[in-house]
Amino acid sequence: MSRTSSTKDLLHPKNKHRAPYDFEKLVAAEPWLAAFIEENKYGTVSIDFFNTKAVVALNRALLKLHYNINNWSIPENFLCPPIPGRVDYIHYVADLLASENNGAIPTGNTINCFDVGTGASCIYPLLGNAAYGWSFVGSDNNVKAFKAAKNNLKENPQIAGAILLEIQNDPNSIFKGLVQSKDRFDLSFCNPPFHSSAKEAEKGALRKTRNLKDRKASAAKLNFGGQSNELWCKGGEYEFIKRVIQESESFKTNFLWFTTLVSKSSNLPHFEKWLTAAQVNEMKVIEMKQGQKISRLLCWTYLPKEKRQIWVNSRWKK
């Protein structure tokens, strides 16, 4: 009997999850996972990815085994992030920083990142610190998510001081109220609410269901959970990223690179048009593939190359 799941060789070359999951090692790291492992008709061992508890157990095992992150949890009905995809984001923006540093990825807590909407999982700060030792400020406007993220930090004292969580009291603001004039961030992270309504989110879940083999979808199921502010907002990712771009103009000297995930390729021309109007110095679109899913990282900086070099020399090479 095979003890592995399918290969994910489209992930970033440095992603630890390109190879099939080794469920024996994962169960050894997180025994709770054993209850959710099953064998399909092809003899492949996996879990039911439509079972939120199973996905949470898998995440706990992956975080323990590969990243030394212990006792990770999220409240019921909050978004459970797919670890391989989140790790891809980390590695691709690490390459972005390396492009400013003669190809060498900068590591350690001098690299400071801002995570927009860190969520209950606090996943980008936890993974970014585990992979590269980066420090983070994570923001959120949901009090319950904020408390859950705080608890995940409390359960992992080895990262004490590396991750700071801040409540965004103004739901209409992204950076305002949190980023001060003296602050410097090498990266911003953003995983925006992709959908414009609950109905649209359900349709997206139904498409995901139909794309998975051995499933005959008749009704949508949000298997990864998610609160309304995590999955949808008025105008969806189009309006949310528009706000991020608009606000970024006021913080052009506070950030080396702004980045955000983009789900819908049809939105990219609009975002690129707005960035051009904002007179950014450079923008990049990085394509990421996770199985059948294709997403994009939109990255931009207002700083010309010479100022970016000064930034690197003064902050990374002390």
Image (cartoon, helix red, strand yellow):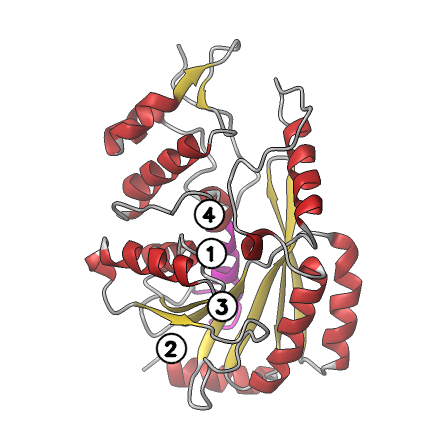
Q: Which residues are magenta?
A: 87-104
Residue 37, how many percent across, how many down? 38, 21
Residue at numbered disc 1:
90
- Depth check, mark 4 against mark 2: the one in front is 4
**Label 4 amino acid?**
Phe
SS for dot 1 = helix
Q: Nearer the viewer, mark 1 or mark 4?
A: 4
Mark 1 in CB contact with mark 3 (< 8 angstroms): no
Q: Is residue 197 left or right of residue 59?
A: right
| Residue carrying label 4 | 78
* Residue on which disc 2 sits: 316
| In-front residue for pair 152/189 | 152
Q: How far apart, in angstroms, are the residues tagged by discs 4 and 2?
A: 36 Å
Q: Of the residues under marks 4 and 2, which one precedes in the sequence?
A: 4
Which residue is under mark 3? 97
Label 4 SS = loop
Q: For residue 93: magenta?
A: yes
